Image (spheres, rainbow, N blue to C red):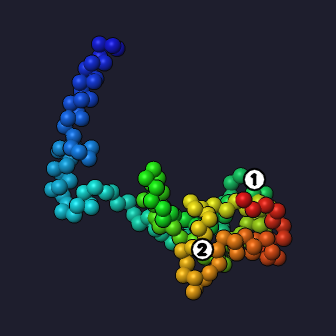
Amino acid sequence: EYEQLSVSIDAALERQRARTGNGETKAEAAAAAATTTDAHEKTSVRVGKATVPFREESVRTRLGAAHTAYLRVAEGCDHTCTFCSIPSFRGSFRSKPFDNTLDEAASLVKSGARELCLIAEDTNQYGSDWDPAMDSRRLSHLLEALSTDSRFKDLQWIR
């Protein structure tokens, strides 16, 4: 094995020398340049639109304990942290509509959930993407509704 190590290192160095600055081999870079003229298209892969509307989640099959349920309140993220790729595949931050969120929560509680775990990439920003003139409710309003609305009398925990 030790004798093969120098051969492996030499092969790796040769492959590295054959690459361009962005990690493509020179042949791959030439092929990409020949197939597209848009500079952005040369460096990105499109697999679909990241920012998509919320899908109906109230009729989903719940896995796990019957007393607990996850409630997605938002999707995506508008922060540009250098270490994170969430915005590239989850899209821009968008809150689930307030009334839809409450309806889904009521459905989960009615089906036996006693604990709701609010989930999102950035839960604290719930509602911040809405035009305040159209809907000024935020996370505090959602928590208040989950605590006071009669539909949630059997709800014991909110996380």
* Residue drawn 18% across the image and 58% down it: 35
Question: Which quarter of the figure has residue 33?
Answer: bottom left
Marks 2 and 1, how far apart at CA: 29 Å
Which quadrant is the C terminus positioned in?
Answer: bottom right
Is 68 located above or below residue 25 in the figure? below
Q: Taking the image as drawn, is residue 82 in sight?
A: yes
* Residue drawn 82% across the image and 62% down it: 156
- Foreground disc of the pair 2, 1: 2
Give the amino acid at mark 1: Ala
| Label 1 element class | loop
Give the amino acid at mark 2: Gly
- Of 85 and 83, which appears nearest the observer? 83
Q: Taking the image as drawn, is residue 57 in sight?
A: no
Label 1 packing within 10 angstroms: few (<14), some (14-19), many (20+) = few
Q: Position of residue 122 (x, y in %)?
A: 58, 62
Q: Position of residue 3 (x, y in %)?
A: 29, 13
Q: Position of residue 92 (x, y in %)?
A: 47, 67
Q: Which residue is mark 1?
A: 65
Q: Position of residue 151 (x, y in %)?
A: 80, 75
Q: Residue lying furthest right in this view?
A: 153
Going by the image, does 120 lie left or right of 149?
A: left
* Residue drawn 45% across the image and 59% down it: 80
Lower sequence index among marks 2 and 1 = 1
Going by the image, does 99 lie left or right of 50?
A: right
Tag of residue 127: 2
Question: Which quarter of the figure has residue 48?
Answer: bottom left
Q: How many marks?
A: 2
- Of 54 and 62, which appears nearest the observer? 54
Label 2 packing within 10 angstroms: few (<14), some (14-19), many (20+) = many
